[in-house]
Image (cartoon, helix red, strand yellow):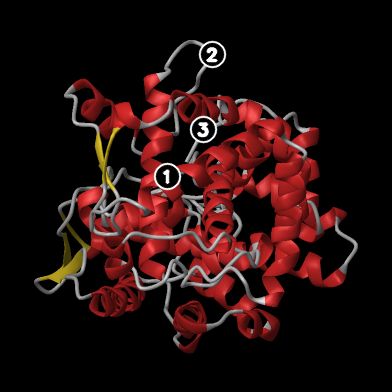
Amino acid sequence: MIWSALGQRIFKNRVSSISNDVRNYTVNLLHHHVIKSFIETDATTSKEIANAYPTLDCLAFKQACLLHLENLFVFSMLSSESDDIDTIGVLGAAKGRNALNADRTTLKFTHNKQSNLLVRQLTLGVSGRYKTPFIEMRFFDKEYRYHHPEYQKSWSKTECLIESTHEFQALVVLLVVHLKDIVQRQETIPMIDWGEVPAALKSAYVNCFLTPVAVGKKTRDFWLSVTELDEGAAGCLYQIIRENNDLDVLPYNLFHTAKDAINDPLERQKVVHICSVEPLLAEFDLLFKLLLSERTQDHAALYDAYRELGRTVNTLTSLANSLAVKSDIFDVLQGIAHQRYRKLLAITDHNYPETEEGFAALIDFVLEYHRNIMSLRGQSPWVQTFGDNAYRCNIKLATKPEKSKRPINSWNNRYYADEFTNLIRGLEGKRTEAQ
C-alpha cells in the first residue's frame, strides 16, 4: 500500500499491474467512444429495451454495451487467428476459444452476468481493468457519464484520433449500426448469434487490433497526450527506459538515475521519496519473509538466520530513524498508506538492544503490525507466536532470503517499473507482455 501510493504519485493511476497494455487501452477507448456516439444519436428503441433500460444514458445500458462489445472483440480476434494476429493478452481469449470450439457463441445483450464471457467481467474485463485510468484522464466518471464539460478535451482528442485513422473510423461506424439493430429488437435480452454478426464488423475489429505493436504505432502520440506519461518524473523514467533500449532496468538503478536527472523540484521529490522509503520497506519485507520461510522456528534460530543475512537488530530502527525526521513524506501519503507508514515508523519509539531478547521484541512489533493489517481484512495472521519463544507460519512457506540476493539497501518493490516498461514497449510499437 505504501509503495503503491508513492508509485502512483508518479504514474497518476495510468499504469498498474492490470492496466499497462496499449491495445487494451485502445479497445476500451474505442468502445466507450462508440457508446457515447450511439447515445448521442438518440436512437429509437423497442418497447422491450425501453422497459429494461429507461434511458440509453443509464449505467446499466452502458454496461450491457461494454460487455457485448468486449465479447465481439474477443470472438472476432479468435475467429481470425493466424500468424499475423497476436491474441496474447486478449482478455477472455481462453474462455472465448472454448466457447467457439463448443459452438456456444450466442451473445446475450444484458448488463447481467448472463452475458459474461469472463467471470465478473465488468471488473476483470477490459472496461473494468482500465476504468480507473480513464476516470483519472477525465473521459468519464464512475457512472460512465461522458458529457461533463471537463471531459470535452479528452473526447475532442479522441475524435481527432478516430477521424485520422481509417480503421478506427470504419469500426466505429459499423458498431454504431450494430447497436442500433440490437435496441430495436423486441426482446428484453436480445440474443445475437455469432453467425448473425456481419463479416465486415468482424474484419474491422481485426484490422484495428491486429497486434499490440500495430496499435502502438497508430496511437502513441494520442496516448502520450492524454496520459501525460512523457512529462515530469514519469517522462524522465520514460526517457531512461528508452535509452536503455527498453531492456529491464532494475528499479533501484532506474529511480536513482531519474533522481539525478529531474530538474523540477516537485517532480524530483516524488522519486526521492521512493528512493528514501524503499530500503525500509525492503528490510521489513526481508524479516517477514524470514518468518515465513519455516513452518516453525524459535527465537534463537531466527536470530541466527537474520544475522547470517548481515542484519542486526539496529538495521530496521536506523533506517526508520532517518525517515522519521522527513515530515514531507508524511505530508504526501494519505488514507491507509499514511496510517501504515506512521505505524511502521512507530518502531522508532522503542529501543531494542542487540540481544536475542531485543530481537524477539522487534519481531513482536513486526507481527503486531501484520496482525492489524490482517484484522482489517477479516483474515487470520500468516505468522503467529507459538509457545513462549517460537513462531508458526500458517501459509505456504516462502523462499528463504539469501544474503547475496538481498544486500542491505537493496530493493524489494518495483514501483510499476515493469508495467511502465511494458506500456512503453507498446507505445513504441514493440513487442509487449499484454495485460
- Decide if residue 80 is on the left or right side of residue 50: right
The mark nearer the N terminus, 3 or 2, is: 2
Can see residue 256? no
Disc 1 crowd, CA 10 A, few/some/many (<14, 14-19, 20+): many
Residue lying at 48% horizontally and 61% vertically, measured from the top left = 283
CB within 8 Å, label 1 to label 2: no
The residue indicated by pointer 1 is 69
The mark nearer the N terminus, 3 or 1, is: 1
Q: Quadrant of residue 369?
A: bottom left
Between disc 1 and disc 2, the foreground one is 1
Q: Residue furthest bottom?
A: 349
The residue indicated by pointer 2 is 84
The residue indicated by pointer 3 is 433
Relative vertical location of residue 191 with respect to residue 38 in this rendering, above or below: above
Q: Nearer the viewer, residue 297 or 135?
A: 135
Amino acid marked by disc 1: Leu
Between disc 3 and disc 1, the foreground one is 1
The local secondary structure at tag 2 comes to loop
Amino acid marked by disc 3: Glu
The x, y position of residue 226, in whole percent, is 73, 56
Residue lying at 70% horizontally and 56% vertically, measured from the top left = 227
